[in-house]
Image: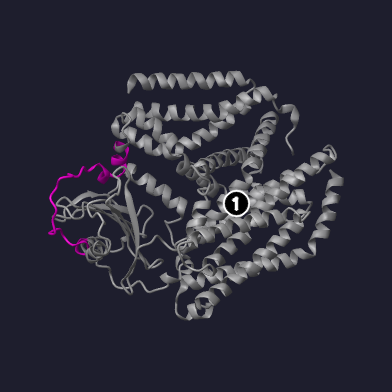
Amino acid sequence: MPAKKVYLTSPGQRAIKIVTSILGGYFLSITFHVWLGVLLPTNGRNIVLLTSTFTLFFLWGVLMILPFLAKSAWKILGLYMLLILVFSVTIFYIR
Amino acid sequence: MKLGGLPNRAYNIVFHTHTVSGIVISFALYVIFFAGAYTLFRDEFYQWEDPKARQAIGNPVDYDALLADIKARHPSFDQSDDIYLYPPTEHKPVLSFLGHQKPKDKTEEDHFHAQFYPHNKEIKFEEESSTVGLTLYRLHYFDQVPFYIGRYVSGFVALFFLFAVLTGVLIHWRNIVTKFYGFSLKGSLKQIWTSSHTVLGLLGLPFQLMYAITGAYYMLSILILLPVVMVFFGGDQKKVLALLRPNEGIVLNEKSPKTNNNIRIRQSLEEIRAQYPDFKLKTINLKHYDRDDALMIVYGKDPNFFSGDGMITIQLKDGKKVVDMMPGNKTYVQSVLFGIAGVHFATFGGILLKFVYFFLAIVTCFVIISGVLLWKEARNKKNYTDKQKLFHHRVTMSYLAICFGLFPAVAILFMAEQVIPAGAKHINLVNSMFFLSWLMLTIIGLFWKTEARLTRNYLYTGGVLSIAIPIVNGLVTNDWLWKTLTNKQYYVAGTDLFWLGTGIICLASAIRFWQKPSTTLERNKEASLKT
């Protein structure tokens, strides 16, 4: 205590990680929930919508941590964007 | 017993994010939890804050007669528009009314308030005339900050709190079993703060996690609604509302004829009461009251079970149930939001549950404060320059001054409510006095040099002001503690007793603390030499 500096990343990488963490975390969490809803019939959608009132934030919280653990900020950003894209495209075609 | 913890690199990274997110939100989170803790008892201390409400609950209200009376005294009252009635309860034996009047210019809707006192049948055309509960309630999501900025800020504070809770669990995973009984007041300051931060943080974990998530939901629900409405409901927000409350989906005919032959409200309510004897009414919403297709929507709660919230919609023409969401008849989709409200506002149990919540909220405040102190003490080492140490000290002092200054300011808020005379400006004056005294107390605190002295002085100020609260109440309203106790006005007496107890505890701990500052400082120096 405090954390050892050797393990922390450079400011530039950190900025990307913070953006990935907050914005990426949100968009990944919401697209995942909507994607899950889209796969289900109407009643299932409603259940997903109401369950997301708490699970959206929990998943967002977890997804906020992961980018900081990644070795490369660009890779994790790419991964998040790829997943968001996959979910969004599926949502767009199935809905 | 040790569990497999994080590897070294991950541990240090998670630790750092925990520190940064924690330090950034700390004082805001403290204010949220502290103000929120008092808000739990908003109903219970209502009679204390509004002496006019210190009455027996009175006979059942005849709602139709009341609405006719309001119409007679307030001719522009539009009985076809939404009417809200909040029936008198044991906590608040006053009926609140919200109705619409025909708008002067047609673009805006125009509503007005009234309070009805059942014991002497007096009607006052005003909003609630007291503010303590409302002020603290609004403070706990920073609603006083204009343009909804405060609401979003508090939402993101809740979100980062969730982040801090999750990272905190990851950090302490390795020793999470021993932390259950690891509390100790021995060792250096740093060890004391570490032990209280981790042990109390762990004990309060489910409570804190729940508040992080429900708090984020309340302030950031638009982040769910916006995309979901776009994708699932074709952009029509009303469809979501109709899903949660089917009564919102009923379309009323604007040209339906006026009538006087509808069933009387009281009769209809008695039928509900006969069917659900324990169901406590909270809100009655009337639509098209003076028309043929009048609807009465009744909200309430059966306190006997967790999912006891309910709603029923009745057609006043023939008494037919249109929507039935009474306890036991709700679907999962209709129950979730009631459940979130239940755990967030501690309404699923009795007064004891509220005390447990209050205690856990204060414990959380302590976890936040010990986190800040731990942050400072952990940096009280040789490899930090004096300039850096001074910065850490100043940050800690400002945080503590903002946080601890709130406590005496809340005591002043309670007194201001009684001391400042009733009138149109009352609420504004009480609020200005509260926020100005908080500001003053914070500024004074910055001059108290050390953290120990600052804490002690705030305990003294807060303690003395707390004890003054029952005295002020006695002087202004003549309801002294012994009087209210013998009259069985337990909510008024309970509020006085609460403040008396708080004051005594604060003064007692401040007096014990009085000899401590010198020794803590020495211990502080010893600790800094060791590390």
The residue pinned by badge 1 equals B364
Is B433 part of what is drawn in magenta? no
Q: What residue type is labelled 1?
A: Thr
Residue B187 % position (x, y): 78, 53
- Relative to B82, is B484 on the left or the right? right
Residue B133 % position (x, y): 48, 59
Nearest the eye: B163 or B50:
B50
Query: Which quarter of the rendering shows the C terminus of chain B?
Result: top right
Nearest the eye: B504 or B49:
B49
Residue A42 % position (x, y): 29, 32
Indicate whether B185 appears above or below B124.
Answer: above
Residue A35 % position (x, y): 39, 26
Chain of the residue under label 1: B
- Quadrant housing residue B171: top right
What's the magenta region? B239-268
Q: Is residue B2 in view from this perspective?
A: no
Is B262 part of what is drawn in magenta? yes
Q: Is residue B147 in view from this perspective?
A: yes
- Residue plotted at (45% across, 71% down): B51
Nearest the eye: B515 or B92:
B92
- Residue plotted at (43% across, 27% down): A31
Query: Which quarter of the rendering shows the N terminus of chain B?
Result: top right
Indicate whether B303 appears above or below B140.
Answer: below
Q: Is mark 1 on a helix, strand or loop?
A: helix
- Residue plotted at (54% across, 41% down): B153
Q: Residue furthest toward the front?
A: B105
